[in-house]
Structure formats: structure tokens, C-alpha cells
Amino acid sequence: MNRSLLFFSLLLSAFTMVAQQFKPVEDYVRISARAGDPLYTTYAATMARSRLYGDKAYKMDYYSDSRPVTYTSDQAGRMFCIWKIDEVAVTGIGEYLVKPVVRFSFPDMAILEYEPFRGIHVKETFFVYSSSVALVDMEVKNIDRIAHEVAAYPILETGNDSLEIDHFDPESDGYVTKRTESPYRLISSLKTEYGYPTRVTDFFSAGCKSVSHGGYRGDMSDFYNAIKTDFYSNKRVDSLNMRSDGMVDFIALHLKKRLKPGESVNFRYLRGCQDQKEDLGKLEKIVDSVKTFMLRSYYEDNLILFSKIPRIAFRSTPEKLAYLGAFNLARGCMYPPAGQSKYNFYVFSRNPIWGWGHGHQVLHESLSMMAYAYLDPVSAEGSQRVYIDQQRDDGLIAYRHGPRGMQDYPHKNMSTTSAPFFSWINLEVYKINKDRKFLDDAYASGSKYVEWLIKNRDSNHDGTFEWGPYGIIENVRDWYNAVFQVSAERYLDVDKEDISDELECLDLTLMVIKEERSLSKMATLLGKNEEAEKWLALAEHTTKLVNERMWDEPSGFYYSVNKKDYSFTFMTRDLKRQEIIGFLALWAEAAPRDRAERLIQTLTDTTRFWRKYGVPTLSAQDSWYNPNVDYCCKWNGPVWMLWDYMVYDGLRKYGYTGLAHLLAAKMINCVTVQLSKNHNYWESYSPDNEALNCPPNYIWDAVIAKLLIDENQK
């Protein structure tokens, strides 16, 4: 082969490889998710069209045989469509000829296909346009050889006995209703003084002229009777009841078209909602304009958004769905600047909405930015800049920051901070976007924050750290913490219950080491070599103290110690309770190699930490261990993805790549089992079983995307 031909051959080979790697993003994000696949199905409006109060996000149910494809918004009811083909009513997915398959799933949009009846194909697009308006577009095609009469009945159902028809607007061809929304939540109710509406107006309309409309009491079995009047009855009419006022359980529209073979029709229905104090005319105008929107441009916006994410090689379909879903989760929690926040910010969950998780950022939730930055690095930087912008002059980054400003929850005349992951996150975000200005600003802010921690969280100036007096929230380990919590059932007051301000705390000390190491790397990147050496020296000094004070040789593990004498007891309490925190010595690069080996022996013990669905927060041999996730915020056994990710990261740093892969597999299995069962991400997971009772759709599970990216790095 001559040299020119060889060069051409090599060039063609290289081009082919590049073409495969950079195949169109549309192909990369295309899916074929069926009912039992691990698809995340909660959708919220994009940031530009979102607002904090009066916001409606939705969960799509495309998998329950007893219902049609349904879109449910927390406290705001659900909407769906009942089909009637040639007078045959099709009321649930279980009756469909071909059940739904989801082809695309983005943060604000889902596209699915199904056949409710032989010969009728539906391509359905659900789109959350804004915090106030959502729509369902159904492209219905007759793929049969004969004509079919197709009727669609879009329905809005609240199920809380508060839905009242105000009137039917013939000009806009839609129902105007009023209802109430409760601010009560099982876990952390909403504060209505912040602006959450409790009296709401809905506008429910179709994209084309409806044949009829109606309001009804009862359920879908009653509605079936309404649209299937006895064939021989002299009262039989092809119309809904045209009700225009009164209390109802649901309202319905009636759309109809006779389709010849090969003919198509687009049925679209829309739901707008807002506080009753707001101008109804504006809402109707927005809904009317959205009726004619071409959805292709919004679909292409999502393709552009997802074009930035790493194209990893998935080992399985569940991995792909978990990966894409994690980005949807993070993006779906983002809001635009509002209130005292000059930058975009996130909430823990958009749907469902609950008080503590809605409105402010906390540093440990911000670990999700390490994944989100791959999707939108500028937005991830903006979220971190919320902390930088609201940081107090003395360096404090408080427990919560966001649209209502800094919230430091003072206790005993001391401000409350949070788990200091700040500079670690900023460094990881910088690695993705390479924004020098962000790195410079983040380094300055992070330096001030660590200096504040050294001054305010080392009360005896001995080089290791204690949590503040409001430790029960500051240490972000909430309930049933075997070390910090005094009573097994947490029945004492806050000052008697938590002792984390009276110990030299292993977790905080390791976090400070990690912050110092991160600042050293940031300083090096900025050319600040002397400062880099300073931070590294501080990290190494604190590491030395951890190994002198907090390592127990007989058990081969790290623990918090008594602040007064560095013993492993506090009054009558034994502090040698093995928690996941001990493994953070690997993450912080604080464990000598021989001690790392001892930690690995404990980690891989199936009777302690190496459980089916990951590494639990507490050893299974501990008397407080409980694998049941029966409420939020528990630290006596549940698996928390972000803490397991830190263990994973530590294993990789120490060269235990095989074990890291095994842990990653447990974590991926953990989330995909739940996504297959209920299509949610969760605040925490059981290490041993599948039933969960805790807040769903928690932003920090987006770390799964970061995990999969790490797993696919060479």
C-alpha cells in the first residue's frame, strides 16, 4: 500500500470512529421505556418560565393498567384522556392494544407512543410550558384500512372535594374553576406567608373547538356510564352534560373526529393554574397562545441542552435511563433568580413540594452540581455563586441560602453553617467549564469560609473540629445518629439531644481537610503557589492529628472523640460506633495505606457495611441499625447516595478500582430498582429492602450521573 493510500485509509478510519462517538444527540437520548423500565417521570418547566410560588410540576404515570396515561401535580389533581373509538370506551392502559412506550424524556417534556385501539396510533407529547401552564398534545393517526370514529375526553380531576366550576368561557372554549390547596405536608408543611397559594383558579381548555363539555360527581366508572348511555335509551345523546357551575369532582372536554385510513388529527388539551388573586385574563391569554405553539422548537431546545453531556458507553439500558434521569432530576429542580438571589438556584424537589426542601440551597445538596455542571455548567456556577454572593463579610456560609437570603439559624448566639463541601464542589465544576473567573471568585470565597471554620469550629484551638451548638441540623445527619444523638428516639430538647458540639468530630475534621486540599489545588491552578503550599500544609497537619487522635487500632476504624481528653467515651457513651463517616478518611486522603487496608476489611464485611443496595450509614452490627426507610432524615441504616459516592471516590483515590466498580454497581442497582417500581429518585434508600417512606425526587441523587461518568473514564 502506498503512503498516500495508507494515509487516506487511516484518515477514513479516524473519521468513522469520531462519527460513531459523536452520533446525533437525538439518537443518543432516544429511549424505548416501557412500564417496568427505570424511567424517572417527573417534569417541570424550564428555568426561564418558572417561578418559586404557584409552581406546578407533574409526574407522568404511563405504567398503571388501571388508569389512562395520567399527569399528576402535587396537591393540584391530575389530568388525563379517556378514549372512545367507534363507541368502545377505553378507560385504562391495561385495555390498550399497544401499551405506552416513552421515546424521549427531558426535564420538561415526555414523548410517548401507544395504540389505545386497533388501527389507532397515538404520539403523545406532554410539555410543562411554565409554572402555570402544561399541555398534552396527541397526534392521532388511523393506521387501519377502515375509517374510525375517534373521540377523546380530556379530564381534570382533583379528588379533594374542593373543585367548583366558576363558569365555562365560550370565547376561550374552556372551563374556569376554583379549588383549594392544602399547605399541610406529612414532612415539613409550606409556610403560606411566603406566597404559596391556597385558593387556586384553573383554566382547562382544548387546542381545538370542543364538541361538548361537562362537570361531574363521582369517579371514572360514573363517567363511563355518562359516555356509554344505554344504546336503546331514548335519552341517549352524544354530548357531555354542559354543566356551567357548581361543585364537581372532575371536569371533562369532548373532542371528536372521524378518521379515514391514513388520516391524522391533533388533539391538544391544556391546564393553566394560578392564585385566585392573580388576573384570570392574563392566564387565559397565555393558554390561548400556547394552543397553537409548535412543540418542535422546545424539543430542539432539549436536544441542544443534552448535547453537552458526556457520551458514555452504557453497559445496560437501566444505566442509560438512570443517567439521563439524573440530569432531568437536577435540571427540574432549578429556578431562575428571584428575591434576594441574583443567580439561579435549586430546591430539593419540584414535585412533590414540601416546606424544608423548597426555597433554599444547602451545601450537601449542592453536591448535585458536580453532575449538573455537565449539562449546564453556567447554571451550576450560578447556583454556587448564590453562596458566594450571600456569604457574610466574616466568611460564614450559612446553613441555607437562596431567594429569602442567608439563613443562619442562630443558636446560643452562634450562627449555623452546614457540611463544608464548598470548595470541593467548586473545583469539580471548574474542571468541566474551565471558567477562570469562577475559579478565582470561588477560591477567594472558599478561603474565607475555611478561615471562618478554623476560627469558629475549633473552640479549643487544638486543630480538630467540633460542630456548632445547633449541631442537630448543622452536621446534616439529622435523626437517629448513633454517635451524636443522645436518645434512641430523639425525645429530648435540642440542647440535650445532640452532643456534636462537645466532641472532636471526625466528619467535620475530614471535610475541612478535603476543603484545604481542594483550595490547594485551586491555588495551584491560579498560580498562587505559596498559598497552595499553605493549604496543603494545613491539610497534612490536620491529617496527622486525625491519625493521632481518632484512629482505634483494635477495631481498625476512625471515630469522633471526647473534646476534653480525646478518649472514645463521652460520659457513659461509647463513641466507637462504626458509621459511614469512618470511610471518609479515604475520600479526604487522610488514611495511611496500612489503615486503608483495615478500613477496606470493615467496608467489605457483609455483616456490617457491604449490603445489597450500598453502604449504610451505620454498621448492621450496631444495636441502633435499622434498614427500614420509614421517614425522612435517618442515619441509623439507610443508604444516602451522596455519602456512598464519597466512599466510591475514596476507593478510587486509593487504587481500589475493583471495589469501586462493585460499589457503583450496588448504587446503580439501588436507584434503578426504585425507578422501575415507582419511577422516583429518593432522599435515602434501604440497604436491604425495597419499600421506602421518605421524600421522593431529591436533587442530590443526580450524583448518579457523576458516578456513571467516573465509571466510564479510562
Image (cartoon, rainbow, N blue to C red):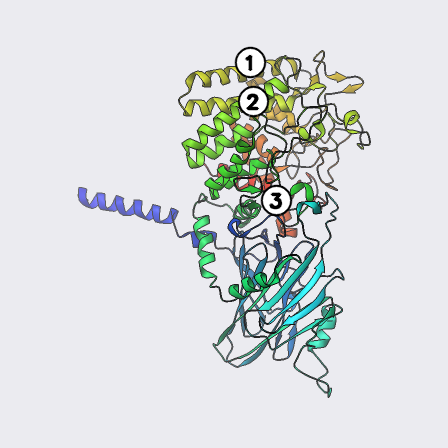
Mark nearer the N terminus (2 vs 1): 2
Q: Residue 673: give its label.
A: none
Q: Which residue is mark 3?
A: 671
Mark in the foreground, 2 or 1:
2
Q: Which residue is mark 1?
A: 541
Q: Amino acid at mark 2?
A: Val
Task: Say above or below: 83 vs 103.
Answer: below
Task: Say above or below: 238 vs 271.
Answer: below
Proximity of marks 2 and 1: CB atoms separated by less than 8 Å: no
- Which quarter of the picture shows residue 407? top right
Tag 2's secondary structure? Answer: helix
513 or 166: nearer the viewer: 166
Q: Amino acid at mark 1?
A: His
Looking at the picture, how far across and down is residue 43, in whole percent? 58, 53
525 or 544: nearer the viewer: 525
Looking at the picture, how far across and down is residue 521, in whole percent? 46, 24
- Would residue 658 be seen by someone viewing this image from the given angle? no
Q: Residue at x 61, y 80 (%)?
A: 86
393 with respect to 312 (left or right): right
Q: Which residue is mark 2?
A: 450
Mark nearer the N terminus (2 vs 3): 2
494 with respect to 107 (left or right): right
Looking at the picture, how far across and down is residue 551, in whole percent? 65, 17
Q: Residue at x 72, y 14 (%)?
A: 567
Q: Residue at x 42, y 22 (%)?
A: 524
Mark in the foreground, 2 or 3:
2
